Image: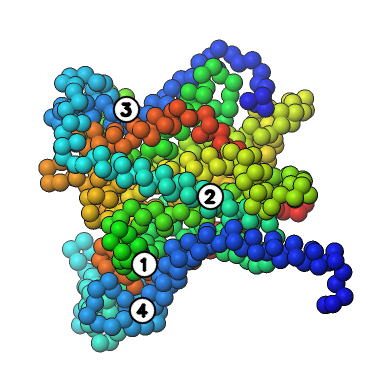
Amino acid sequence: MSSLNTADRLTTGVKQHENIVGWLMAAPALVLLTVFLIIPFLMAFIFSFTNQRLISPNPTQFVGTRNFTDLLTLRVFSIDPILDENGELVLDDAGNPTYPRLREFTRNNPDYPELDGLQELTSWSSGNQRVFLLSSDVVFIRALINTIIFVLVIVPCQGGLALVLALLINQKLRGINLFRTIFFMPVVVSMVVVALLWRFIYDGDNGLLNTLLGFFTFGALQPVDWLGDPYTAFPALMVMSIWQAVGFHMVIWLAGLQNIPESLYEAAGLDGANTWQKFRFVTWPGLRSTMIFVLVIITMQAFGLFTQVDVMTRGGPLDATQSIMYQAVQRGYQAQDISGGSAISVIFFFLVLFVSMIQRYLTREKSA
Amino acid sequence: MSAQPVRPPHHNWYVLGNYALLIILAFVFVFPIVFMVVSSLKPDLQLLRDTSSLNAFLPIGDISLNNYTAAFERAPIGTFIFNSVVVTTVTVVVGLVINSMAAYSFAVLRWRGKNTILSIVIATFIIPFEAIAIPLLLIVNSLPWIGADGIQIGWLNSLHVQIIPFLVSAFQIFLFYQFFRDLPTELVEAARIDGASLFQIYYRVIVPISGPVFATAAILRFLDMWNQYLWPLMVVQSERYRPVMVGLQYFFQLDIAWGEVMAYLSLVTIPVLILYLSLQRAFISSIATTGIKG
């Protein structure tokens, strides 16, 4: 390398210098991120393959994938109807076939070791047989399904509603900024505060929602215990979540709308486009990058569903509002089952990773 | 706002319909907050009775600040607010420096391994805090700290345990990175030719023109930190270091005094609302200008 001329050596020196400064300026963030995020995450990963508890008389051991099979095992199992000595079906009073009790198979039955400890998730009839979907952890599966439903509902509803609000706010009307300010207001209120307030709104006896519904329907509507009823609790939680966060996404849509050049609307107008066509062919394509941003942010927030559940319902009634993160905290912290909670965190991570990869694929730049 | 599309002149009924819709929506967004503030002024019995009628939204009947006095007697609210202010301010200010510096390094400087590290940083964005809370608890419990009484092990029951783990935010680095990356490269090149050091380029060239992204990052972090709930619940048992959201526990003893709860909720919310209302233009426009770079 003795043949390097002065200029080359200078460039190398500058590059070396930039290399060092680059590392130094990123270093504080990287160190903190490693200690307080990456290492804890790796620890969760390792814990998920052990039987670690917060306080335990037994030493921690590796247990392989047991935590995961304990959470995720699903089995389909059919039970044949009970027959009498002649091989005829034994019918109950309503004329339906009768079956042996499920727990005769799932509780210490030496003939069915693979079913031991499993619980019924759901069941249906198929011919004369009764088919059961069994799970090793009914509550977790419920939390998993709920979280996915939550994301599937929240992403289009919150994103769509936010766009509608943005379109309303984007009109040239006197005092429109006041409405923009108001729609954004819940965003700055803590979710803990919001959730406590909405407990009053959803109360079954004299909650505000029942009062308002009664007022506007002149008493035609019977009071509903919104959070106490397994059918309404989760939708109620969703509505409140949208209420709290929709203003934030409205603002992002609004920025996207105001970025679309006016000339495009004028040109579309000259071509005789109506309002819907202008939206479909000018507004919507112009909002592409905004749409991706909103989609990604809402998805992340929705998957992390926790505070609302913790403050409002604690997963109930009848596990109707369980969520993955609530279960992770319940088990890892409240029940001090660190390995079980960690396994949930790991499953969660791969689920979100999977979904964000799908989103990235679906929203990739398509070459024309 | 000149970029707004020009619309044909509206019919009166169209404008009227629009306003009707906007007003209904405004009511939907504001009624729980009005209910909170109004209820904080009422005695418990009236508060609960009023929820069964529209009186819930009206400051009528036996109105007083008694709930606030009682709330201050029940819990050391001043301490809670002080703790939250300290935790929030330090995290926001120090975090902005650390994260923007890292993002500058990623977006502008050239160094070995930066692309790999950047993608790891961005990937960590999908790990929610709840997923790592327990291992994090074990970590902070075994870290040393040099305090007034010399070196001690464990960060539990302190303000720094609520600050240091939250200084870095992958989301914030990502926001800054996007903003810096899209700045015109001529700015940086010109400064380089003028002989500015790499660090000078950061704080003399980049920082002064990045107001909106700093504002957005500060606002979002402020909201996150002021509203901290699960983490302080886990790591702070001592009253001295409790933040506002955990202080709520004092009001959920056996016999819940709802008037005091409402007073406390108002106390921790109204300052944030006032801050928002006084800065709302900057608040909204900065989030808007940062958000569209998706």
Disc with the residue nearer the chain's start (1 vs 2): 2
For image coordinates 68% across by 41% down, the residue present is A285
Kindly check if marks 2 and 4 are in contact, taking CB atoms under 8 A apart as contact: no
Q: Same chain, marks 2 and 4?
A: no
- Distance from Cα at disc 1 to Cα at disc 2: 24 Å
Q: Is residue A297 above or below residue B5?
A: below
Disc with the residue nearer the chain's start (2 vs 3): 3
Res A265 → quadrant:
top right
Q: Which mark is residue A50?
A: 4
Circle 2 Cα neighbour tier, 10 Å, few/some/many (<14 / 14–19 / ≥20) = some
Q: Amino acid at mark 1?
A: Leu
Q: Amino acid at mark 4?
A: Thr
Q: Position of residue A245 (x, y in %)?
A: 44, 41
Mark 1 or 4, closer to the camera: 1
Q: Is residue B17 above or below residue A195?
A: above
Mark 1 or 3, closer to the camera: 1
Residue B180 as seen in the image, left or right of residue A46: right
- Distance from Cα at disc 2 to Cα at disc 4: 39 Å
Circle 1 Cα neighbour tier, 10 Å, few/some/many (<14 / 14–19 / ≥20) = few
Circle 3 Cα neighbour tier, 10 Å, few/some/many (<14 / 14–19 / ≥20) = some
Q: Amino acid at mark 3?
A: Val
Q: How is the image coloured?
A: rainbow
**Residue with the mark numbered 2:** B97
Residue A24 as seen in the image, left or right of residue B162: right
Q: Chain of mark 1?
A: B
Q: Which mark is residue B143?
A: 1
Q: Position of residue A295 (x, y in %)?
A: 55, 48
**Residue with the mark numbered 3:** B34
For image coordinates 27% across by 50% down, the residue present is B241
